[in-house]
Amino acid sequence: MKKNIYIAALSFLLLASCQNSLDLYPLAEPSAEKWYSNETEIQLALNDLYRIDFWQWDEDGTGINYLSDDGFYRQTLTPIKSGTVTSQWAFSTTLWRNSYKAIARANRAIVALNSAETKAKVSQAKLDVYLAEARLHRAGQYAKLVNKFGDVVYSDNVVSIEEAYTKGRTDKKTVMTKIYEDFDFAIANLPTSYATSAVKRATKGVAMALKARFALYEKDYKTASDAAKACIDLNQYVLHSDYPNLFLQSTKNSKEIIFSIPRSLELKVTTGPTSDIISRTSGGFAAANPSWDLFCSYLCTDGKTIDKSPLYDPRNPFKNRDPRCTATIVEFGQPHLGFIYDPHPNTLQVTRISTNTKVTNNDNRANAQFASFNGLVWKKGVDDSWLLNGRLIDPEQIIIRYADVLLMYAEAKIEQNQIDKSVLDAINAVRARAYKVALTATASYPAITTTNQAELRRELRMERRMELAFEGLRYMDIVRWRIAGKVLNRPIYGMLDPVDLRAKVVDKNLWFFPGTPKIDEDGTPDFSEMEKTGLIKNLVPTTWNDRQYLWPIPTAEIQINPNMKQNDGY
């Protein structure tokens, strides 16, 4: 009896685990054999590969899932930041499952498109474009998996149920070769553009940009610089003239966006409700916030770090800073979502802009204890429209944009020590746009001039952080630069509680910052000396574990497949 119960329990476990591994069509859906009978069906099948679920950011900033040192959610840590990642971590398991769903669908499409039946109905020229699109998506998904897990299960064909239970992991180098082949096929066969910019389908530029990102993450700098340069040389993309405006949900079809997944309120494809990053006076929670680490990383307008610039004033820390600072983080005393934002403990009331009347300041922790724990709230992409439609919003999910390609090109060339004018121009173009001036207007922005590799590497890393904050890219930056062990092995800091804040900081004329942190060679602030003064609060310590440089293979995969081996340390 015990043996029968054990077998029954094991069978149930395996059956349940299949849901994590196998992508089976429900009986009500058309099978691959009956699909792809005409171009409409082909396009519908390929459309499915553009799901946001398949292209999620590592951290979206609007909720609890902060993996990097750019933001935090009160005193709650993700497993990455507490050093407790296991093979049952929901976020990594979901990424694995969704990537393999997309790969399975891409493989089915590729097999069908190569069939004699489909070839008899569709011209080879069109088939090549459709195949390129499917292979681009397959490459993008495998790229994410390799970046996160290392060796992964690889197949470029439809996998049977029986085979799914036995396939082991393929060496990463072999998979990388296959990924490059898919990207290159996409580059050769996808169109450079479509007749209307409203079309969001993949193009040559998308394939080049994603290839550059994958290569950069894997430290294949020659491939990365070549792919990024090819994307630049297409002359299809330009930097949006207004940096803050680029991220608003009202901005559509910018020529800076290389690849994005559209959202639509009408079609109920939205993000939200977004209350966690909305200020409390405006009716939100202000629970998900930019970190002091990010805030202090923004350069001053002379191009120097805050610990080196005579322009920096810790009493007025938003003054004389790179414009992307106040485009990303709400400046104190400025309008935001209908009210003046001010976390000062003595500012018990603030102005409602629409009526010019005073209201209770719930962004002050003396009034609302769960107001922002460090006084900062996100601004990038956030405007009054976020308060409408039940706080459901539909900005494009930007996967990659031109500024990132310019910075990837520069970084890859720097790492090869191939530093020339094109490298400086790539970084300076991004910086000049932030100041709303031309690249050549070097008197109006702090243009980078050094050609020293170490110095330029530092400048590049700071530029990426300023430019790409709140876009889900910081985590992979600190991983591939191998600095996660430094930046995620120390506390998240915030303000003292209101009574102590008044007595020790405000009454001593030390508001907002009671000191200035040192900025290290990676552009990262060090608050340890400030902490010793007792004038800032250790909200929660973070703990990084080096095993997390690779994520664990999900438990369900290990349980149902004896050939599936786990990454070290899990």
Image: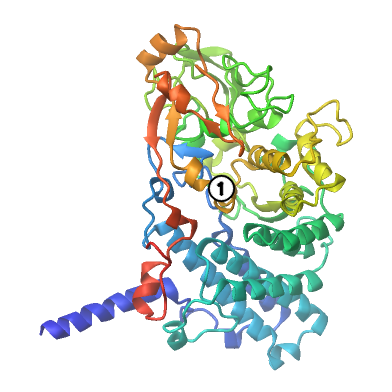
Q: Position of residue 218 (x, y in %)?
A: 62, 61
Name the residue tied to disc 1: 478
Query: Which element type, helix, strand or loop, lies under badge 1?
Result: helix
Q: Is residue 157 shown above or below 251?
A: below
**Residue 327 or 252: which is nearer the viewer?**
327
Residue at horizontal 47%, vertical 68%?
97
Amino acid type, mark 1: Ile
Query: Looking at the rendering, in which quadrant would you find the C terminus?
Result: bottom left
Residue 36 appears in view: no
Q: Is residue 446 shown above or below 207?
A: above
Residue at horizontal 74%, vertical 54%?
416
Q: Is residue 130 shown above or below 462?
A: below
Crowding near pointer 1: few (<14 within 10 Å), some, many (20+)?
many
* Coloration mode: rainbow
Q: Where is residue 154 in the image (x, y as percent from the top left)?
A: 55, 77
Q: Is residue 389 shown above or below 479?
A: above
Q: Indicate left or right for 133 with 267 as reference.
A: right
Hey, which residue is sitting farthest right in the picture? 440
Q: Where is residue 321 in the image (x, y as percent from the top left)?
A: 68, 24
Residue at horizontal 65%, vertical 76%?
178
